[in-house]
Image (cartoon, rainbow, N blue to C red):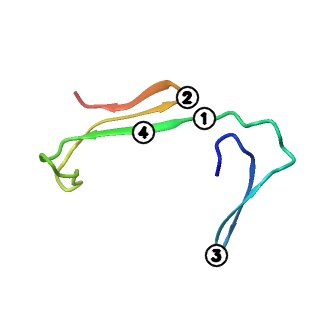
């Protein structure tokens, strides 16, 4: 899959099928979305939902940031 290319996407019982659209020559505009979740955790460990707390959740879409939760 290439950024900026157009595809037909089909879902079947065996998987996902991507077919490149050769008839669409103008490149699609690329969009970026990123998530950031900050938690408390023990040193050198992954967060554990049993006892670690979520401190902040944010995301960024095309360079614009959004704060969902902030528990300062």
Q: Nearer the viewer, residue 32 or 37?
A: 32
In three-dimensional space, the C-alpha distance between marks 3 and 4, rounded to whole angstroms, equals 30 Å
Above or below: residue 35 compared with residue 45: above
Crowding at mark 3 (Cα within 10 Å: few <14, some 14-19, many 20+): few
In three-dimensional space, the C-alpha distance between marks 3 and 2, rounded to whole angstroms, equals 33 Å
| Residue, far top | 64
Q: Is residue 1 left or right of residue 50?
A: right
In three-dimensional space, the C-alpha distance between marks 2 and 1, rounded to whole angstroms, equals 6 Å
Q: Compare marks 2 and 1 and give the one earlier in the sequence.
A: 1
The residue wearing badge 2 is 62
- The answer to whether marks 2 and 1 mark residues whose Cβ atoms lie closer than 8 Å is yes
In the picture, which quadrant includes the C terminus? Answer: top left
Looking at the rendered structure, which numbered label has been put on residue 14? 3
- The answer to whether marks 1 and 4 mark residues whose Cβ atoms lie closer than 8 Å is no
- The answer to whether marks 3 and 4 mark residues whose Cβ atoms lie closer than 8 Å is no
The residue wearing badge 4 is 35
The residue wearing badge 1 is 31
Secondary structure, mark 4, is strand
Secondary structure, mark 1, is loop
């Amino acid at each position: 899959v290439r950024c900026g290319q157009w595809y037909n996407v089909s879902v079947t019982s065996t998987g996902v099928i991507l077919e490149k659209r050769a008839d669409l020559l103008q490149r699609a505009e690329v969009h970026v979305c990123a998530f950031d979740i900050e938690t408390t955790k023990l040193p050198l460990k992954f967060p554990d939902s049993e006892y670690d707390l979520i401190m902040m959740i944010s995301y960024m879409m095309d360079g614009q940031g959004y704060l969902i939760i902030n528990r300062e």
